[in-house]
Amino acid sequence: MVAVLSLSGCSARTQESYSTKVKTSEEKIVVSSQFGSGDVVENVGGTSNEDKKEDSKDNSSSSSEAPNVWFINNANGIGWSAALTTSMNSTFDTDAYDYTFVDGQGHFEVQIEAMNNAIADKADVICLDPIQEDGFDDVLKKAKEAGCKVFLVDRKVSADESLYEGWLGSDFNLEGENAGKWLVEQANGKNMNIVVLQGGQGASAQIGRHDGFNKIIEQNKNFKILAEEMADFDKAKAKTLMSKYLDTYGDKIDVIVTHNDTMCYGVIETLKEKNIDPNKYIIISFDGEAEVFKLMVDNAKVDLCVECNPLLGPATEKLVAKMVAGETIDKINYVDEGVFTADMAATELPNRQY
């Protein structure tokens, strides 16, 4: 793995931004040029593929030979998750694939049921964005025995690597490290107290961002993490947790870190409701949604955003094509991502695709 300037379809970053272009695949990973809005994508089902198969028989003989590909997402929300779903659907919901999308609805049980349905449908490839790392062992074994290839998108699982073909997504540890490195430079030796709003317990993004950030912070004695609790990537829970932090620590807080932009919006709202100027704090967020860039432009209410690229459809398709052809793919595949400070936001905002 190497760290160099990231282009990733956006403007070039400076070395000071800790931009990361990490690639292990032989082909360049690029973002989707077709992706338009970040609107919520409607649930198109996924419990059965029979109707689609009948349509394929009526249309043409070639369509019936299209690879049977399923995508089981994590949760069909707004912002980042909607961008991932839209990118996948716009890539695979074409005549080239017999495609089924399932909304995971944020529930592990829904994902397990969808996996079993995909296996029963004899899917060639099941693309899965797992809601948690643990608990998928049995269904992955079942898929392997049935000859269904499983490809992980965005998040990872704790199961043995032999049970899935590969994974595509972000280097969450590196994201956390980059946020920590930037904060070290900003502090310049000054003592700072930090509160962290973590994502969902056991999610790859939560684990990686926590481990990477804390690794850097623990190397610098001028930092103290006052508290780090779960807000589940949720805005409402973030508002509740931020209120608790303010009641408990008050003026002791110097830095606020949120594991995603959605929680960051909750933090900003909470501060405004309490008539507290967000610029009183250094605020760090992860994901890189357009809305958080607007907050960065708006009097620098957010100081740093570490990008997490959700536009994984085109890159996934390249790897799926290899799997269908019987080729071996790399186990780990990273997407290009950058790190943006407030002074970069105005220039970068027009480039945001989600």
Image (spheres, helix red, strand yellow):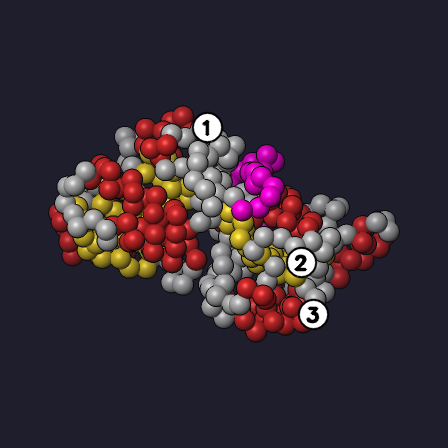
Q: Which amino acid does label 2 sit on?
A: Val
Q: Do the residues labelled 1 and 2 touch (CB within 8 Å)?
A: no
Could you tell which of marks 3 and 1 lies nearer the N-terminus?
A: 1
Secondary structure category for the residue under label 3: loop
Q: Position of residue 160 (x, y in %)?
A: 53, 67
Question: Where's residue 272, x and y in %?
Answer: 24, 42
Q: How far apart are marks 1 and 2 (CA)?
A: 34 Å
The residue that mark 2 highlights is 125
What residue sits right under mark 3 in the picture? 146
- Return the mark for residue 11: 1
117 relative to 169 in the view: left or right: right
Say which residue appears at 38% left-offset and 42% top-offset. Answer: 306
Assess disc 3: are there few (<14), some (14-19) or many (≥20) residues with their C-alpha within 10 Å of its C-alpha: some
Residue 80 visible, this angle: no
Q: Do tag 3 and tag 1 residues touch (Cβ < 8 Å)?
A: no
Q: Could you tell which of marks 2 and 3 lies nearer the N-terminus?
A: 2
Image coords of residue 315 (percent x, y) = 60, 44
Rendered image quadrant of residue 143: bottom right
- Which three-letter amino acid code belongs to the residue tagged 3? Ala
Check disc 2 and report its element: helix, strand or loop.
strand
Magenta span of residues: 24-42
Residue 350 in the image: above or below residue 170: above
Q: Nearer the viewer, residue 196 or 213?
A: 213
Q: Specify whether residue 35 is painted magenta.
A: yes
How far is the residue under mark 3 from the one under mark 1? 45 Å
Q: Main secondary structure of the magenta part?
A: loop
- Amino acid type at circle 1 is Ser
Q: Is residue 26 above or below residue 125?
A: above
Q: Residue at x 51, y 49 (%)?
A: 169
